[in-house]
């Protein structure tokens, strides 16, 4: 039988491994790992005595089955966490008026044309959010 010894120099990493081991194994290891040598991995016969560092670092003998682990409650990829704000035509028009007062009439007209419309009233409801974002890029406060 072979014994694998791993000596870890970084106490924070050793503590994290101990905490993980305790969580998986159901035991609590409150003794912090004391590192005395650089990271090393050796194999030796089981009859050899172990060092104090090797005795303090506990590692799980086998990974826990997936069904035994607590479920992670992460949102599914691609699912938005919050709905984007909804904008009204009145809000868009007020923001556009601010840009016109600031002398950005040409930029505003180019923006309307880039959305394929001649006036804000011609925007489709699904275009309002993107149009509001573009207005912000021009300097509007909306």
Image (spheres, rainbow, N blue to C red):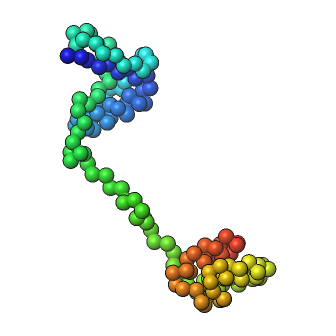
Residue 69 appears left or right of 53: left
The image quadrant that residue 111 belongs to is: bottom right
Q: Residue furthest top?
A: 48
Q: Nearer the viewer, residue 117 or 79?
A: 117
Q: Is residue 59 left or right of residue 119?
A: left
Quadrant of residue 49 within the rendered picture: top left
- The residue positioned 27% from the left and 34% from the top of the image is 22
Q: Is residue 16 visible?
A: yes
Q: From what the image shows, is residue 8 above or below residue 50?
A: below
- Percent of width and height locating residue 48: 25, 9
Residue at image point 42% right, 16% down: 36
Residue 66 percent across, percent down from the top left: 23, 45
Q: Position of residue 106 (x, y in %)?
A: 76, 81
Please identify the quadrant where the N terminus is shown: top left
In the figure, 14 relative to 23: above or below?
above
Image label count: 0
Please indicate whether residue 70 sits to the left or right of residue 110 in the image: left
Q: Quadrant of the C terminus?
A: bottom right
């Amino acid at each position: 039988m072979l014994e694998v010894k791993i000596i870890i120099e970084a106490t924070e990493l050793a503590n994290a491994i101990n905490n993980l081991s305790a969580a998986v194994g159901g035991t609590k290891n409150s003794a912090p790992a004391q590192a005395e040598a650089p990271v090393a991995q050796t194999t030796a016969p089981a009859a050899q005595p172990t060092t104090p560092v090797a005795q303090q670092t506990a590692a799980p003998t086998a990974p826990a089955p997936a069904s035994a682990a607590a479920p992670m409650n992460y949102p599914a990829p691609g699912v938005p966490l919050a709905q984007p704000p909804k904008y009204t035509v009145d809000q868009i028009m007020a923001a556009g008026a601010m840009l016109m007062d600031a002398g950005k009439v040409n930029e505003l007209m180019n923006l309307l044309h880039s959305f394929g419309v001649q006036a804000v009233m011609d925007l489709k409801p699904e275009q309002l959010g993107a149009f509001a974002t573009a207005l912000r890029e021009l300097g509007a406060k909306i």
